[in-house]
Amino acid sequence: PAFDREAWDSLADGKGQPPAGAKITAGFDGARRRDGTALVGCEMETGHLFVLGYWQKPGDADDDWEVPEGEVDQVVDHMMDTWDVFRFYGDPPFWESALDRWAGKYGAEKVVRWWTNRIKATAIAMRAFKNDMVDGRMSHDGDEKLAEHIGNAIRQETRMRENDEPLWVIRKDSRDSPRKIDLAMATVLAWKARGDAISTGALKTKKRRVASF
């Protein structure tokens, strides 16, 4: 496994979603038919992760079933209307047009295409997420499906190294496996977006000007 399921479970705090107006980041990873589609948020100040939406083909659905894009749009709109979304990273495959539409509506500086097929960048994001998980720098809403996907993620070594350490990404245990990992990937993207946002100074508060007499 890529991640320690027990370590992840220990970080559940039962707080659910942050209050309206909180500054957050988000991650999106999706397919259309074979795999699921996931949207995860992260409160910037606290590092609290929470599931906003997940869509997966029902067991009794027809072969032509497809993720209902209208529902995904509604959840994205709800997220943007409810919280102060500073940065939203989305993996583009199968959702290029939707990401373009969301960027056009909410701003390209906010809705950003983040390609997970960039192996080195993705591997570094994975390492940072795992290290911060082990160090207890995050919390989450205890969503059972997300915990399942964290546990399903398999570590896949790459041929790259950094600081003499092997770099790795995540994958399913097989191409057609029913053990999905989409929520795990969306969570890593939300966490990466938070780290990048903090590095820009997004959590800084303006100093009050004290009048002198």
Image (tube, rainbow, N blue to C red):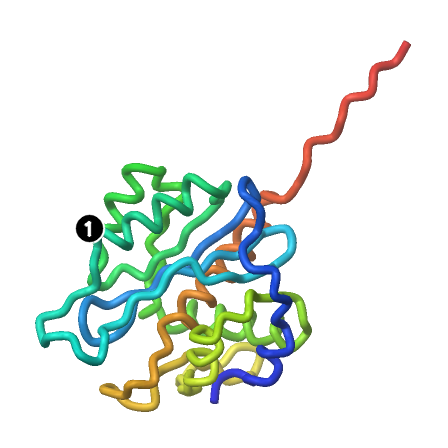
Q: Residue at x 34, y 51 (%)?
A: 75
Residue type highlighted by circle 1 = Ser
| Relative side of 163 to 149, left or right | right
Q: Quadrant of residue 153?
A: bottom left
Quarter holding the C terminus is top right
Query: Does 60 sit above or below residue 103?
Result: below
Q: Residue at x 59, y 50 (%)?
A: 198
Q: Residue at x 40, y 70 (%)?
A: 183
User: In the image, residue 102 lies at what x, y percent?
Assistant: 29, 44
| Relative side of 110 to 213, left or right | left
Closest to the observer, 157 or 178: 178
Q: Which residue, as the protein is rendered here, is positioned at the far right? A: 213
Query: Does 5 sit above or below residue 91?
Result: below
The residue that label 1 is drawn on is: 97
| Relative side of 48 to 183, left or right | right
Q: Which residue, as the protein is rendered here, is positioned at the far top? A: 213
Label 1 crowd bin: few (<14), some (14–19), many (20+), radius 10 Å: few
Q: Secondary structure at mark 1?
A: helix
User: In the image, residue 124 lies at what x, y percent?
Assistant: 49, 71
